[in-house]
Amino acid sequence: MKFLDEYRDGDLAQKLAAEIHRVTTKPWTIMEVCGGQTHAIVKFGIDELLPKQITLIHGPGCPVCVTPLEVIDQALEIAARPEVIFTSFGDMLRVPGSTTDLLAVKAKGGDVRIVYSPLDAVKLAEENPSREVVFFGVGFETTAPATAMAVFQAAQKGLKNFSLLISHVLVPPAIEALMSSPNCRVQAFLAAGHVCAVMGYEEYFPLAKKYRVPIVVTGFEPLDILQGVLLTVQQLESGRAEVENQYARAVCRAGNQPAQNLVKKVFTVVPRKWRGIGEIPQSGLGLSTAYAAFDAAKKFKLTDHRVEEPAECIAGLILQGLKKPHECPAFGTRCTPEHPFGATMVSSEGACAAYYRYRRHDMKEMAGAK
Amino acid sequence: MCLAIPGKVLSISGDDDLTRMGRIDFSGVVKQASLAYVPEVVIGDYVIVHVGFALSKVDEAEAQKVFEYLKQMGELGEIEEKSP
Amino acid sequence: MKAPEFSAACPIPISQYPHVLMAHGGGGKLMHRLLEDVFGKAFSNPILDTRHDSAQFTVPPGRLAMTTDSYVVRPIFFPGGDIGSMAIHGTVNDLAMSGARPLYLSCGFIIEEGLPMETLWRVVCSMRDAANICGVQIVTGDTKVVDKGKGDGLFINTAGIGVIEHEQIISPQNVQPGDTVIVSGDLGRHGMAIMAVREGLQFESTIESDSAPVHEPVLDLIKAGIEVHCLRDLTRGGLASALNEIAEAAGVKIAVEQKLIPVREDVHAACEMLGLDPLHVANEGRFVAFVPEEDSQRALEILRRHEVSAGAARIGQAVEKAAPLVTVKSALGVSRILDMPSGEQLPRIC
């Protein structure tokens, strides 16, 4: 595939890795924000090409992982209703709530359907006027424009049988929350490339300045991530703390204006609870008053309730980059992708799930080495 | 997060900016995507597509830069090897 | 291998019975007509024609292999095949994995009331044609009709008997350290062909299912004297599933290399688009073979002479007797675990 496969070239990756080795003289801790980047790092083994002095920490950039249990329970409640066609991206189907998951609700007779795009859910609403179609809107800023368009088009078409359960989250507040935590060890960030394709990277300049951390907007293929790490290390070694754009083939500083405009029109910034971290102010998107009629939580009169995570789960510490998966006593034994305790084991982007699937054979060695 | 992949715009339909759709070719697999957010895109351009929406146009000149950089590094390496 | 085009008109008058009724499974006149005019006519052979409750036949000397599978694929017709041809190929291939020559098949049909008669006839014709190409006979069967809402259209079960005309023991327990792992062709076509027509995900593509019989290349390998230690056909769960099952049964560590595993460009693109791993995607006309390293080149040459295995490739080796593990070396030269996929392959946005 053009503009994809050439960024997976093994020889060129080795060259970038060699250059990183050449310029690294001190230990550095770098966080890659996005779950897609974590996935690529573990799948291709990018971290194994880096010098031992570089520690990559996997950040909370997995919207599936950070969706609170309470919201999943709300989704399950709605999906079980006979009049509802519940639509969702595939990622959310296996995520367990307090007791069950969407696949189990489907097995019991719930009409749960996977969609590729939120517009497919709008189409379903048009084609099924006697049913209530609900779309589960999760994702970062990358996905918000798609959800916004679904709401906008539904409003234009005057659809009365369409609503959304929204759990969109924003990246910069999460980075700020991490950086302001006293235990934070992160010295630089690889910012999420596709989030920045939408939002641009203007928001990162104040963060880089305030916390004195290099922030490099990075893509998702091996050459992107390696180049992102190289630019980051070059900054760290020379004492700079600037914002750079590695993923310039898809990202520009101002981002995508039409997308940002529609998101601002349809959504409003709200506080959002992040599973494993807690509530972060101004870190989520909710429907604005003009579009309140499309809010499934209001339409189905869902109540807020608190759900406690299993006490053993250290997902919060992992999401903050303070612990690694194999340091959890339940990792790989009581907690696995088939029966996850918490956020980071739940989707394949979660740090625990990624390590479990791809690396558990080195886990014992790694644990021993510590 | 944000699984988005590059594809080539084969055809465009719809007059309205917001309802403009494109047929996007991903190496032999074709899927429709909304072009609402990339009004400047024309047939033949490459776009990055996420959940049925083109989010940006691929800047082909920028796309080459990492390969040029690596090529230069390679040449530099050779010069360094040759010098005493 | 492309299924022949469906051409003949349905023998049950469609104007009279456009849909399958409960009565077609009731044991009376309507069912008799269905059995005679549809199944009996399409699958006709001397054994089936006797219309006994059980089929009687002799088999050539040798060990026997037997297998059974049920087919529930949706949609019933997909690019490159249908539930019927898939059912024939699937059972023939399971027999082939023992190195058996497939001989006789049984077919059980569970039909949902309301299934269009035309659909049933098309599937049956497809099975007839597939069976003819494979050189197997459908010698016995069963038909049931279930209430509307209880059946999802059509389910098919096939069982098969084949004869093993060689002395080799082909099984995971025979896998030896150092054995070469060969895959018979490119991966992921069947799963992605189904995804392309799946409700909610449709995309335009020319990807067709690879559903096809593989017994001929397998029998050729054995005839040529290649020591075949293990065979496994790749179905649901893809290459990852098959290799993990073998690793577990054989107690070995298997290592393969991503760059050696053939995947067609459009299948790769479709997987990227939906966030799926081609190594986890279903196949229907592909198998892996474990052969001693010294036989591997010759094995590849033999396989490549057949259309269905023209793309055969060496992808790795059984490394050592050890705790079961399958690893894959990425394009960057780093190895990671190739895990058993968990559950259904779901597209993702993350």
Image: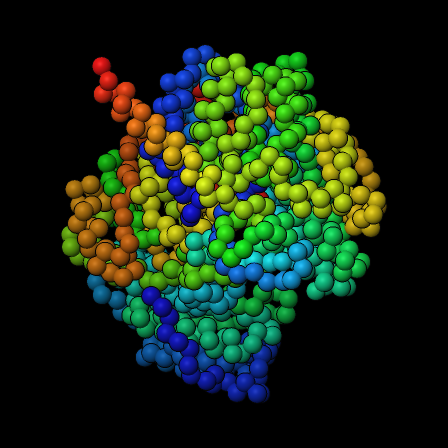
User: Residue A68 location, x and y as percent?
Assistant: 70, 34
In the foreground, A263 or C223: A263
Question: Does residue C206 appear left or right of residue A250 in this picture?
Answer: left
Residue A78 falls left or right of residue A208: right
Q: Quadrant of the N terminus of chain B?
A: top right
Q: Looking at the image, which residue is at 34% across and 32% down?
A: B71
Q: Position of residue A171 (x, y in %)?
A: 65, 31
Q: How is the image coloured?
A: rainbow
User: Whole-percent x and y of residue A267?
Assistant: 76, 42
Question: From where the camera sits, is residue C35 visible?
Answer: no
Side (left or right) of C193 relative to A258? left
The C terminus of chain B - image quarter: top left
Can you say whether A222 is above or below C130 in the image?
above
Residue A282 position, x and y percent, is 75, 30
Q: Is residue C349 above or below residue A191?
A: below
Residue depicted at 52% across the width and 64% down the height: C75
